[in-house]
Image (cartoon, rainbow, N blue to C red):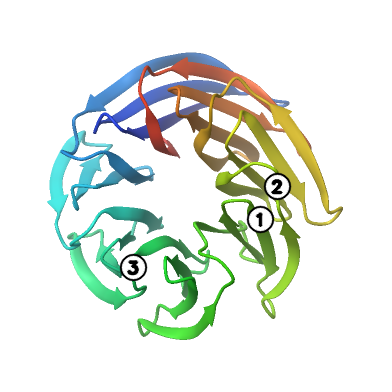
Amino acid sequence: MVVKLLVTVGTYEKTVYGVDFKLDGGDDDFKVLAKKSSFSIPAHIGYVKSISSGPQYLVSGSTDETVRIFDLKRRKDYGSLNSHSGSIACMAFYKQKMLFTGGEDGKIIVTRCADWEPMMTLKAHAGGVNSIAVHPSGKLALSSGKDKNIKTWNLAVGKVALKTKHAFAVERIVWSPQGSYYAFLSDRHVQIFATDGAKMLIDEKPAKKILCGAFLTETKLLVAGEGSDLMIHDIQTKSWTTIETAHSPRIKDLQVIEVDGKIIVASGSSNGLMCLWRFDGSNLTLLDKVESGLRITCLTVTTQ
């Protein structure tokens, strides 16, 4: 089976840059058959701060306060959304039906992808939104902000179901694939909670600053940041595995995608290196890498 992946990065150069990978998904493993630069779009007049994609749509958010929309299947530029009055700090799709964007204006705006009209505007966080993460069910979301608040949103009614004050400002929130767990990532903190009862299971303080992360499986969390290492935390064994990489000096973003039952990881670092990895259940193996020559700020991956 041949699989096509598109890895796209946002950059300080104000562009979005995409690379197509063609993989052979054999019985045992993936191998890269071909790779090529797909596009380089001067998307913004400010640097790209957030990015998200799915099989059809790619969106990018910038310090220029706009969200740009691209149709990947039709290779069409749908223009910009201008609903925020501050930098677009984070964004997330829910099944390419709804787009959630969080801004430094403190608002979370939910936009319907069918016509790109706003469905709801949530007054979320004083000082700006850091992260928005939608539960796999689509029924609730978690958000964090510079005000150190964590909010649980009932998306059916667009209201806060729970608000808690955290000890520090959480920079990124991620859900496990089935939504049984979620993680808070910030600076030198990694905290993992069980969704049922919101019980904290892990409270770790890695030696280096954490910038990004994603769940590999329901019980294994991948994180990275300052330095060149990728680190896997196993919730069940409460152990860490460290993978040395060619990234330098910091890994700015990473994303996980499941393809035909196999786990693929895409990562990007500030020196412009884009890497594709295969996760075998315990370790990561490098499949391929691309030198973009750009200063990467954020990354997304999707099937094509």
Q: Which residue is mark 2?
A: 206
What is the secondary structure assignment of the residue under circle 1?
strand
How packed mark 3 is, by other alpha carbons closer than 10 Å (few <14, some 14-19, many 20 or more), is some
Q: Earlier in the sequence, mark 3 or mark 1?
A: 3
The amino acid type of the residue labelled 3 equals Gly
Q: Position of residue 224 (x, y in %)?
A: 60, 40
Instruction: Please identify, in this view, whether the residue under mark 2 or under mark 1 is nearer the observer.
Output: 2
Q: Are circles 2 and 1 on residues that touch, CB within 8 Å?
A: yes
The image shows residue 61, relative to residue 140, as above or below, that is above
Q: Position of residue 88 (x, y in %)?
A: 28, 54
Residue 12, picture quadrant? top left
The amino acid type of the residue labelled 2 equals Pro
How packed mark 2 is, by other alpha carbons closer than 10 Å (few <14, some 14-19, many 20 or more), is few
Q: Which residue is mark 1?
A: 190
Of residue 52 and residue 162, the one placed in the foreground of this image is 162
Instruction: Please identify, in this view, whether the residue under mark 3 or under mark 1 is nearer the observer.
Output: 3
Q: Quadrant of the N terminus?
A: top right
Of residue 243 and residue 100, the one placed in the foreground of this image is 243
Residue 212 can be seen in this image: yes
Q: Earlier in the sequence, mark 2 or mark 3?
A: 3
Name the residue: 24% across, 47% down.
63
What is the secondary structure assignment of the residue under circle 2?
loop
Q: CA distance from mark 3 to mark 1?
A: 23 Å
Q: Which residue is mark 3?
A: 127
The image shows residue 79, relative to residue 74, as above or below, that is below
The image shows residue 134, relative to residue 47, as above or below, that is below
* Residue 92 horizontal side relative to residue 59, left or right: right
